[in-house]
Image (tube, rainbow, N blue to C red):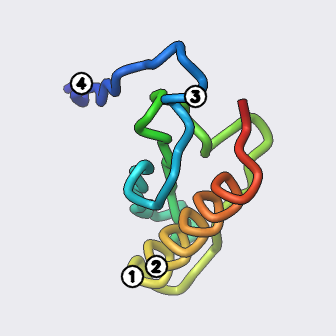
């Protein structure tokens, strides 16, 4: 089974593709269970103005492990919010 792809419009104009608020980002937070029974948060952060994937990146840290799926998902969401805040303060081209 394949998952549907999320496609966001890509703007080539850097003046219009710059994110201005938290609503210009999409945070997808979930979790998975490891073979040891722990839970690890999974995160995807996309800047909607230009479709750029901000997280995960090569070498991105694991989020967890945690004792429950809810803790893992909440930690992933908080980490995603930190990524958004950081990108708003220091936008990456």
Q: Earlier in the sequence, mark 4 or mark 3?
A: 4
Q: Is residue 56 above or below residue 30?
A: above
User: Label 3, label 2: how many angstroms apart (C-alpha)?
Assistant: 33 Å
Query: Residue under circle 3?
Result: 15
Q: Are marks 1 and 3 in contact (CB under 8 Å)?
A: no
Residue 1 image point, x, y percent: 20, 26
| Secondary structure found at label 2 | helix
The residue that mark 4 highlights is 2
Task: Identify the residue position indicated by label 2 in the image.
Answer: 74
Assess disc 4: are there few (<14), some (14-19) or many (≥20) residues with their C-alpha within 10 Å of its C-alpha: few
Nearest to the eye among marks 4 and 3: give it: 3
Residue highlighted by disc 1: 70
Q: Name the quadrant containing residue 65.
A: bottom right
Q: Earlier in the sequence, mark 4 or mark 2?
A: 4
Q: What distance separates the C-alpha of mark 4 from that of mark 2?
A: 26 Å
Decide if residue 43 is on the left or right side of residue 79. Answer: left
């Amino acid at each position: 089974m394949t998952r549907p792809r999320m496609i966001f419009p890509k703007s080539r104009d850097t003046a219009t593709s710059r994110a201005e608020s938290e609503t210009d980002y999409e945070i997808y937070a979930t979790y998975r269970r490891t073979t040891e029974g722990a839970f690890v948060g999974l995160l995807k952060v996309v800047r909607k103005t230009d479709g750029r994937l901000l997280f995960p990146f090569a070498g991105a840290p694991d989020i967890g492990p945690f004792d429950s799926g809810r803790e893992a998902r909440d930690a992933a969401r908080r980490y995603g919010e930190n990524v958004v805040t950081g990108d708003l303060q220091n936008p990456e081209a």
